[in-house]
Structures are given as structure tokens and as C-alpha cells.
Image: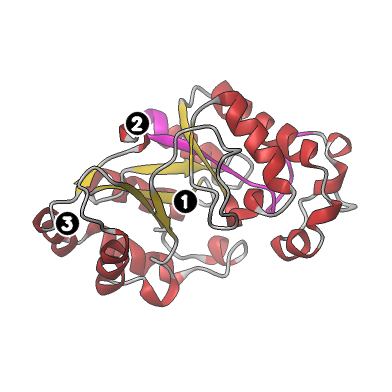
Amino acid sequence: MKLIINADDFGLTKGVNAAIVEAMNNGVVTSTTLMVNQLGTADAIDLIHTHKLENIGLHVNLTLGKPVSKPEDIPSLVDGNGEFHSRKYLTDHAEQVNAEHVYIEAMNQYLNAKSYGVEIDHFDSHHFAAFLPNLRDGFIKFANEVGLASRRADYYIDDLQALAVKTTDKFSARFYGDRANIEGLKETVRELKGSDNQTTVEIMAHPGYSDDELASLSSYTTQREHELSVLLSEEIKIWLQAQEIELIDFKGIK
């Protein structure tokens, strides 16, 4: 089996950024996805250039902070203060969101990352919001137009035919919360593993250092430190080798 471990939320805070760089340089994280509108974005971009990090994707964000686009250009995605609606609001009111607004914002986030010299090679979405009903039409239009690899959309939808870009064969979000421990990661891998050693899979991860800045933005705080310790552990590195699992990035999928 060929395994991608992707660290979401690069750019959220400096503490998250530091942990992701550590997990990429010294652990089993093989790629990460960048948020372009957060407190830690500038720091993340500096780290990308300083450490010459590769395998950077775009974490399309529709639920936290202010958009990259002008609010008047994407009115169905923002509230009266020009900030994104919450994930819960989008879940409850997805039918009111204009898919074209999702396309516009996703494209502007992609172009914003490119403008800072970041070479984006894949896409996913913060809180999976871009895969919600209706919203996914705009995200799929964007992903197909740019043509880069994407996280699988069947977290929310079984029919993947509309998404005409490279994806892994399988995806799991189960290395999270109560399973953010060594046995939890092993079990997640076991659930994905098949008999074909060419099968490609992605596991989502959220390493980070917990601090007040993170707590102001996310309810997932100390668990990120638990994830980091697992992703850096020698036990996991040895176990993955023993399972004949090859660590790859999104350039390594068919």
C-alpha cells in the first residue's frame, strides 16, 4: 500500500506551523495543505521558503475568518461583517449558497498562494465544507479547471464521476480525537490496507502545538500535540516499514 499522511491547517497558527514542519522533516507526514487567510499564513509561507518545503496543497477554507475575495463578490458565503459563515450554518443552509461563489473564492485562494511563490500540488477543504451538497459543485468546477490532485469527495458523496482529477483510492479521517494515539493510527492504516500493494490511500492529520492563539480559533487543541507525538514516533516508522507501506505524496498517485 502507498500512504499519504497529510497535515491539514498549515497557516492556522505559528504553533500549528512549527509542528507541521517538524512532522514533515522528522516524522511520517508527507504533505500539508495551506490556509491562506489565517493568523499564521505569513509565517507558514516563510517556513515553506526557508525549509524549501515541497508537497504543499491548498486547504480551501470557507468557514473561518475573512475571505480572500471581496465579500460583495461572494455574498452567500459571508455574514454581515464580511466573515465566513460557520461550518454549522453552511451545513444547515447549503441550499442557499451559490456554487459559483465557492468557485470564485477557491480560485482566489489558489491564486493568492501562487502569488507568494508557493507551488500548490493538491487540494482539500477545511472542515470538509467544500464537499457539502451544492458547495461541492463550485469546488469540483474549480478543481477540474486547475487540474491538480484532490482529496476524495466521497466523505460526503458516493458519486465521484464529476471530479475529473487524480485522487487516492481511499481516504480516512479517523486518525482524530480519541484515536490520536499510536494504536489509533495503526488501526486506521489496517482499515485501509488491501491486498494490492499499488493501492493509494490518504490519512488526514492535524499535528500542532496548543496555545491560546489556537484555542481562540479551534476546539481541537491538545489533541494536536498527541497527534504530533505519534507522527514523530520511531515505533510508527518501524511499524509502517514492517507492514511494507510506502510513504508517498500526491505526485505519487495515479
Residue placed under numbered mark 3 in the picture: 240
Residue placed under numbered mark 1 in the picture: 8
Inspect the image, locate mark 2, and give the three-letter code of the amino acid beneath it.
Lys
Q: Main secondary structure of the magenta part?
A: loop
Inspect the image, locate mark 3, and give the three-letter code of the amino acid beneath it.
Leu
User: Residue drawn at (57%, 37%), measured in percent from left and top?
Assistant: 163
Cα–Cα gap, marks 2 and 3: 20 Å
The image's mark for residue 254 is: none
Mark 1 in CB contact with mark 3 (< 8 angstroms): no
Helix, strand or loop status at disc 3: helix
Inspect the image, locate mark 1, and give the three-letter code of the amino acid beneath it.
Asp
Within 10 Å of disc 1 (Cα), the crowding (few <14, some 14-19, many 20+) is many
User: Residue drawn at (28%, 64%), measured in percent from left and top?
Assistant: 229
Precedes in sequence: disc 1 or disc 3: 1
Q: In the rendered view, tell whether residue 99 sits above or below residue 94.
A: above
Residue placed under numbered mark 2 in the picture: 251
Across and down, in percent, residue 160 comes to 55, 44
Across and down, in percent, residue 221 comes to 49, 68
Precedes in sequence: disc 2 or disc 3: 3
Foreground residue among 201 and 12:
201
Residue 187 in magenta stretch: no
User: Residue drawn at (67%, 33%), measured in percent from left and top?
Assistant: 141
What's the magenta region? 48-69
